[in-house]
Image: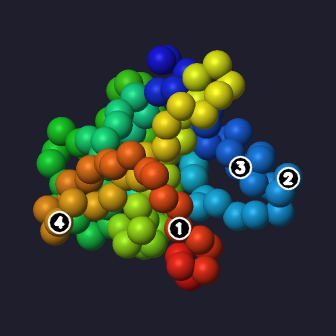
Amino acid sequence: MLKSGRKYDSVLLLDKIAAGMGTERPKTELWSVGMDVSGRVLKREFSDAGAHVLLPGRKTRRDLMPSEDGGYRWLVQEYAPLLASFGEWRVFFTGGRLTATVLTTKKGGKGMWTFAHVHVMRSLTELR
């Protein structure tokens, strides 16, 4: 559980895999005081279901703002507009075997997200 909460460690691994395959991923870096985050997304480690995600141009609650106290790390990531349109695939493995695939999608216009188990996959042509 602790390893899965450290999102930046996963980002580094996914960046390495993408580079080896010649594909691109949204640029992600650790947030630091004074960093220009305009037009980008802030995400907090050890959080899920969009609980600590600050999207560009949205008003935010003060308690979600990054702190300088050395608590949880915050990540700054390029904004991926297709995420809101098509959602995010989450694939779960247990003991090296695929156990579930879910699609996290935006729920209405309230900025909330929901997930559904995936039984049918979209082709890359459909996603273009």
State the image quarter where residue 91 is shown.
Answer: top right
Q: Which mark is first along the chain, 4 or 2?
A: 2
Eye-nearest disc, 4 or 3: 4
Q: Position of residue 123 (x, y in %)?
A: 59, 71
Separation of residues labelled 1 and 3 (CA atoms):
24 Å
Q: Label 4 sits on what residue type?
A: Gly
State the separation of the CA atoms marked 2 and 3: 9 Å
Q: How far apart are marks 1 and 2 (CA)?
A: 25 Å
Q: Distance between the residues labelled 2 and 4?
A: 37 Å
**Tag 2's secondary structure?**
helix
Q: Which amino acid is tagged 3?
A: Asp
Q: Name the residue under label 4.
A: 108
Q: Name the residue under label 2.
A: 20
- Residue where numbered disc 3 is placed: 15
For the residue pair 51 and 21, the one nearer the viewer reads as: 21
Q: Name the amino acid, label 2.
A: Gly
Q: In this view, does 64 lie to the left or right of 5?
A: left
User: Disc 4 or 3, which lies upstream in sequence?
Assistant: 3
